[in-house]
Structure formats: structure tokens, C-alpha cells
Amino acid sequence: MRIKMGTVILLLFFLLILISSCNKAPQAHTEIIFGTVCSINLFKKGTEKRYQELFARLNELDQILSANRDDSTIAKINAAAGLHPVHAGKEIIEILSSALFYAEKSEGLFNPAIGPLVRLWNIGNENARVPEPAAITQALLLVDWKSIHIDSENETVFLEKPGMLLDLGAIAKGYAANEVASMIRSWGISRGIIDLGGNIVTLGNKEKGTPWHIGIRNPELSGGNSIISLYASDVSMVTSGINERFFIENQKRYHHILDPKTGYPAENDLLSVSVISPDSMEADALSTTLFLLGREKSITFLAAFPGVEAVFIDKTRAVHVTNGLFGSLKIRDSSFYLYP
Ligand code: ADP
Ligand code: MG
């Protein structure tokens, strides 16, 4: 049998395409949702249909939970403040109940009624500026989590004072991450990575059975490189810091985690706090709470949360970790150091 040279070349060409498509690493699927970059990677189990279902759910949650869109359920609850209860649905009831739990535990530092203050500061938008002290005092009167009323049976929420505004920005992505993680598990898939703008959930282990490495970004930079890596299987890690949303006025930096006691961005020696917990909503709520508490108070506070670990990076570039993390973390940038 005689084979023509042209045929051989053609066959080789197809073989090459076949090999390269087999070797292609499975890509994460990425979309902008919750005002941030959200990506999910199911590796070999990542089909178009599965990603579509997961991202449809994330978009649906944004539609319900966003404090920034006029048509969200949260916006409807806010518009009815001082007037009447609004049907909120099971998601908001669950998230808000949890938010009120953290509000109570932190004596109102974590505060889902923070909306009027967030709106006043407008951090993350171009025209952000330091508000007048009188306006801050005015807004603080409405930052009152005890005036949020939940009726779980009828799934309604009522904000007692006119002008009150809910803002679930410090906890909603954690809920969403739990939600997609449980969808994935319900499909019998046990390996994957979910990253909703830094709200990370690792499912299972890497293919060879070793744990995932997850990174903490340089908290001095926006979108900086990962400077710490941690070994993690089936946990969530969520970071709150001074560098994701902020503005600078008169050489002073104003970031987006607001202290409901003062009305100003929380001031302490921290650059960031990362919380590790099996539950992403807990990690999300706690990362914001611990940032507000500061490191020393956080350690006492965490005694009530067994199984939760934290990494605090302070302005001297010292990295403080809770006991359970010693030995499972690596600092990759020598300008940061592990506090003894
Ligand atoms: P990120 O949104 O970057 O993931 P966080 O989870 O720490 O960071 O949430 C910060 C957001 O939470 C703010 O942008 C604001 O919407 C809201 N927020 C600010 N201060 C508080 C507070 N004291 N309690 C609850 N939520 C807050
Ligand atoms: Mg948070």
C-alpha cells in the first residue's frame, strides 16, 4: 500500500490537534457578579451545562441580595423602611438571621443596617469623599440592627425606621459560595474551586490526593500577588482588608469597612484578616467582624467559634496566625514574617 506524503502530513496535523486538545488544562468559568470577579473550576467535571446552572444561581442571588441595584429584593425592603414589611424569601431570611447573630455577638460592630453609612461614604465610587461630621451623626441614627424585624414564618422583613437601609455586602458572597458548593456536592462532584471575589471554597483535594494551596494576596496592594499559601481541603477562606475598596483624601486612606460606633472606617493596625472555616458564610461574616474588632479582641472573640482559624496581617508586615494554622502555611514574600 502506498501512502502519499500529503496524507501523512494531514494525519500528523490532526493528531497534533487531538493531543493538544487532550492536554488542555480545564479552564475555570468566570463572570462578573456581585460587582466582582467570580470563578468556578470543576476541572474534568466542568461541563457547559453545569457552569450555566451554577452561574444562573449566582446571578439570581445577586438579583435578590444586591444593595446596589434598584430592582433587588433588598432594595424593596429598603424602600419600605418605616412603612410596611416586605416578602423577603428564604435566602434573605437565612442570611439576615445569621447577620443578626453576628451583630449580637459583636455588640453591633458587624451591622447589616450599615446601609446609610455605606451610601454616605460611597467608597468604591469615583466621587467618594469624607462626609460632613453632621451627616455621619445623622446616618448613625439609622444604623440600628435592633430595628430590623424578621418574621421567619411569613418570610417578611420590616425595617422600623424610615431611611434605614440593609446592606448584606459583608456576608452575601459567603452565602452564595455555600450555595454553589452544595449544588456541586449534590451532583456527586467532590473536587473543585469556587472563588467569588476572594471568597474561596475548596472542594476535596487535588487530583493526586494532596490538599489545595490557597493564597492570601499582598494586602498592601489592590489585586497584589499571593504572599502566603495555605494547605486547604474542604474549607472556605475569606479575606477582609483595607485594599479592595478605598479612596485617599489629604494623604489619608479611607477603606470600606465602617465602624458603626464612630461612623468612620475601622482604624487599627491591621492590613487584612483572613478567616478559615468549613462554612463560607461564617468565614465572610467573621472576616469583617474580626477586622472591626482588631487582633487582640479577635482572639478572645474566636474562643466561641471552635474550628475557625484566622490569619491577621498587620501594618508592620507581621503575620499572626491562630494555633491551628501553625505548620500549614507558607510565607512566600520575605518582606512579611510569621510572628512568633
Ligand atoms: P468585601 O466586600 O471586599 O468582600 P467584606 O466582606 O469585609 O469585604 O465586606 C465589606 C462590605 O460590607 C462593605 O463594602 C459594606 O457593604 C459592608 N460593611 C461595611 N461596614 C460594615 C459593618 N460594620 N458591618 C457589616 N457590613 C459592613
Ligand atoms: Mg465579609
Image (tube, helix red, strand yellow):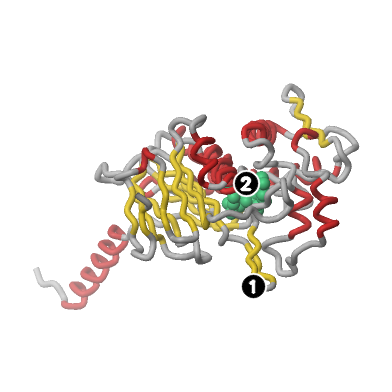
On residue 251, the disc is: 1
Which structural element holds mark 2?
Answer: loop
- Residue 57 shows in the view: no
Instruction: Give the residue drawn at x 74%, y 66%.
Output: 129
> Mark 2 sits on what residue?
170
Indicate left or right for 205 with 298 as reference: left
Question: Whole-percent x and y of residue 89?
Answer: 71, 33
The residues tagged by marks 2 and 1 sit, at their Cα atoms, a distance apart of 27 Å
* Residue sitting farthest toward the bottom: 5
Q: Residue at x 41, y 60 (%)?
A: 226
- Amino acid carrying mark 1 in the image: Gln
The residue at 46%/54% (across/down) is: 313
Where is residue 262? Give x, y as percent.
72, 50
Task: Say few, some or many: other residues with alpha carbon within 10 Å of mark 2 (under 14 / 14 to 19 / 20 or more).
Answer: many
Query: Which dot marks residue 338?
Result: none
Q: Residue 287: x percent and y percent?
A: 54, 45
Would residue 339 be found to the left or right of residue 236 on screen?
left
Q: Is residue 250 above or below residue 223?
A: below
Q: Which corner quadrant of the image does residue 247 belong to?
A: bottom right
Q: Residue at x 66, y 42 (%)?
A: 109
Q: Give the class, few, some or many, for how many residues have Cα within 10 Å of label 1's Cα (few <14, many ≥20).
A: few
Q: How many marks?
A: 2
Quadrant assignment, res 126? bottom right
Q: Residue furthest left?
A: 1
Q: Would you say the residues marked 2 and 1 are in contact, meaning their CB atoms lie under 8 Å apart? A: no
| Identity, as a three-letter code, of the amino acid under mark 2 | Ala
Q: Nearer the viewer, residue 239 or 87?
A: 239
**In this picture, residue 6 sits left or right of residue 337:** left
The quadrant of the picture occupied by the N terminus is: bottom left
